[in-house]
């Protein structure tokens, strides 16, 4: 179950979606919105996605994880729109027979998502300004493209 | 007769959308244009795009492509600034 949601993510529903009797381990990553960025106070965040491509990429990285590890189910849900501080912006749940594979796959999925899935975060600061987050275009130009 | 030009749907996101001032536009380009023809187009609209060029990625029909990927009639071409999901 992969989804991009404009409403708050139901974390337990994401966890439930990977449950099955054959599963011995469920690993969950929850990314939450932070109240500070590079020393500045953040008051709220907003996410934008190229929805059809983001969903396609989420399916692709989930399929890659299934090929690398023996997984039962993978669910990735990302929030878009305005998100208050402290709320989940992404929930990834992975189930497998044994814990090691679930841990590794979950880490892989969040790292891949951050590299390639077309979603953008904008931070609103306490001083009333806002900016698109993370790498500047200049910083990005100095790194290798995934 | 061979078609001399094609129509593509240009889509912009995040900072690229804001710099250009629009989110979607139908564009007529010469047939066999490389994908980075859309960056050339944006640079003509706003020279600031030239500085961003190295960091912008292009997706055609929901798939990342390189800058020389040949465009075809009806393609959806998206210009994607550095992503920051998670």
Image (cartoon, rainbow, N blue to C red):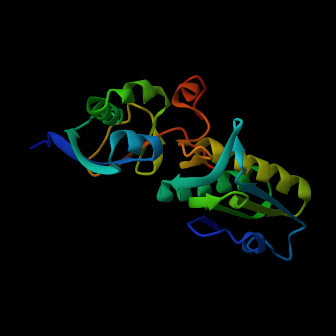
Tell me the residue at 22%/47% (across/down). Answer: B7
Tell me the residue at 42%/24% (across/down). Answer: B51
Q: x, y (%) of residue B63?
A: 47, 47
**Residue A79 makes an appearance in the image:** no
Q: Quadrant of the N terminus of chain B?
A: top left
Specify whether A72 is left or right of B67. right
Specify whether A6 is left or right of A104. left
Tell me the residue at 81%/75% (across/down). Answer: A20
B70 or A29: which is nearer to us?
A: A29
Q: x, y (%) of residue A53?
A: 49, 54
Specify whether A106 is left or right of B29. right
Q: x, y (%) of residue B67?
A: 41, 31
Specify whether A55 is left or right of B33. right
Where B67 falls versus A91 (above or below)?
above
The picture quadrant where one finds residue A24 is: bottom right
Q: x, y (%) of residue B60?
A: 40, 46
**Residue A59 makes an appearance in the image:** yes
Tell me the residue at 77%/74% (across/down). Answer: A16
């Amino acid at each position: 179950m992969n989804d991009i949601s404009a409403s708050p993510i139901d974390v337990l529903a994401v966890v439930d979606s990977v449950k099955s009797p054959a599963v011995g381990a469920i690993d969950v990553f929850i990314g939450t919105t932070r109240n500070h960025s590079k020393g500045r106070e953040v008051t709220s965040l907003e996410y934008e996605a190229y929805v059809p491509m983001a969903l396609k990429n989420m399916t692709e990285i989930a399929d890659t994880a299934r090929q690398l590890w023996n997984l039962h189910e993978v669910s990735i849900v990302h929030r878009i729109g305005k998100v208050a501080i402290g709320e989940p912006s992404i929930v990834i749940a992975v189930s497998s027979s044994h814990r090691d594979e679930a841990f590794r796959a979950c880490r892989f999925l969040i790292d891949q998502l951050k590299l390639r899935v077309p979603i953008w975060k904008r931070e609103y600061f306490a001083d009333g300004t806002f900016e698109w987050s993370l790498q500047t275009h200049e910083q990005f130009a100095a790194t290798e493209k995934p | 007769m061979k078609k001399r030009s094609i129509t593509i749907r240009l889509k912009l996101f995040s900072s690229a959308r804001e710099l250009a001032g629009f989110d979607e536009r139908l564009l007529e380009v010469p047939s066999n244009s490389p994908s980075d023809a859309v960056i050339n187009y944006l640079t003509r609209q706003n020279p600031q795009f030239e500085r961003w060029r190295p960091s912008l990625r292009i997706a055609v029909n929901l798939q990342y492509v390189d800058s020389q990927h040949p465009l075809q009639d009806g393609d959806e071409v998206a210009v994607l600034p550095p992503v920051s999901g998670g």
